[in-house]
Image: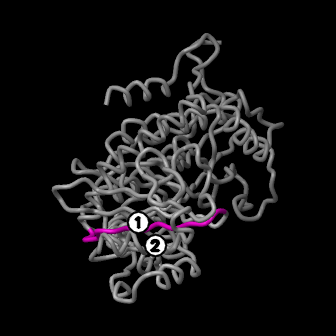
Amino acid sequence: MIRYLLVAACIAFVSSAAAQTPVILSQREQAKVIDDLLDDRLHTVLPKLMRREGIDMWVVISREYNEDPVIETLLPATWMAARRTTMLVVFDRGADKEVEYLAVSRYDVGKVFKRAWDPDSEPDQWKQLARIIEERNPRKIALNKSEHFGHADGISANDYDQVLNALNKKFHTRVISAERLAIGWLETRSEREMVIYPQICRIAHDIIQEGFSDKVIQPGVTTTEDVVWWYRERIKELKLDTWFHPSVSIQRNEPEAIFARRPQPVVIMPGDLLHVDFGITYLRLNTDTQQHAYILKPGETDAPEYLKSALAKGNRLQDILTHSFVLGKSGNAMLSESRKQAIDEGLRPSIYTHPIGYHGHAAGPTIGMWDMQQGVLVQGDYPLYYNTAYSIELNVTVSIAEWKKDIQIKLEEDGYFDETGFRYIDGRQTELIVIPKQSKINR
């Protein structure tokens, strides 16, 4: 654990005379951390999940340029993708024995998956896979095939047929979907990952703050598109990646609905309420954040009270939703309960919260979609498990009398659920960002 605390410290922010600068690990150091996290997960997370789901063999097969969403989370950091046809086999030999990790490959795959194929003695890779399966005689052979969950549907139709063709027919009835195991593997965060995740979210928050400042925004000159591309460039400068193109939009005291009708880009002006949707990818983990900022008018030193009150209603909707997090409860149940309570309190809610982790829109229970506020079939019925992370994404519609119109407070913050309950990984926005930031010096 000490090593991971040191890594977290390396990622943390250090003060300089000019600004607070995030210290990002070099590519080489990132690779070391990724591989160490993977090795730890394979020994502490996966065996428990296999026993939870009653699966004793998991076979993950992927071909180069047609990658399974799961396999990228099982490969070492220096592997950018599957090579040729990559086959990984995980076999649970029993509660009193270590799980066996095999690669039907010419070489080891990372530190854990050991080479289990000699092409010189058996040229047919599929026959070797069948031999490995038959020698171990598993009760269940789980493949990543799923009707409803894309994250768990990574095996191609051809590869699925190849497995069946290679296997003795007596094993065909043992072939099952790895759906719940694949989702569990993707959604479950390890203890060591949760030492690092807060720092990743902190980096994302600080980049948002930097972009929503007078360092980047000059009212009357800077456009929303200027800020969007500043975020993209800043991500690359910091040796980070993003899993989606950020967006910056405006609501202001005009009758026109800027979110929907005004062409982009829009010049940012005093009195504007800005909104950003932004995420980064670092050490294979993702963030997803939406926050608001206010551009001060001449003579103002803070955002108007009516906008502060609107933000508070957004925070209240967050609280209602996160208080509904209970082990085993489905996404649809959380959505229904939260919407009812919010409406009873006089709010106008829209909830579209999703898991986060290895993917931005990650595996796990869907808690509403913006166009499915009555529930989401199948994905919304998936239950809540401990040690899982979520982007609490939602909005509340608020009437602003001073503007004679409705606005939307759109918020999104990353959080974590375990035996202690729900918590935000690096806090949440409870105050509007003010541009320019006000100095304590009287002028």
Q: Amino acid at mark 2?
A: Asn
Image quadrant where one finds the C terminus: top right
Residue 61 drawn in magenta = yes
- What's the distance in space between the residues labelled 2 and 1, CA to CA? 7 Å
Identify the amino acid type marked 1.
Ala
How many neighbours does mark 2 have within 10 angstroms: few (below 14), some (14-19), or many (20 or more)?
Answer: many
- Residue named by callout 1: 182
Displayed quadrant of residue 367: bottom left
Residue neighbourhood size for the residue with mark 1, other residues' Cα within 10 Å, grouped as few (<14), some (14–19), many (≥20):
many
Q: Quick one: SS at disc 1?
A: helix
Reading the chain from its start, which is encountered first: label 2 or label 1? 2
* Tag shown at residue 287: none
Residues tagged 2 and 1 counted as in contact (Cβ below 8 A): yes
In the picture, the quarter occupied by the N terminus is top left
Residue 185 vs residue 328, the one in the foreground: 185
What's the magenta region? 53-64
Secondary structure state at the residue bearing disc 2: loop
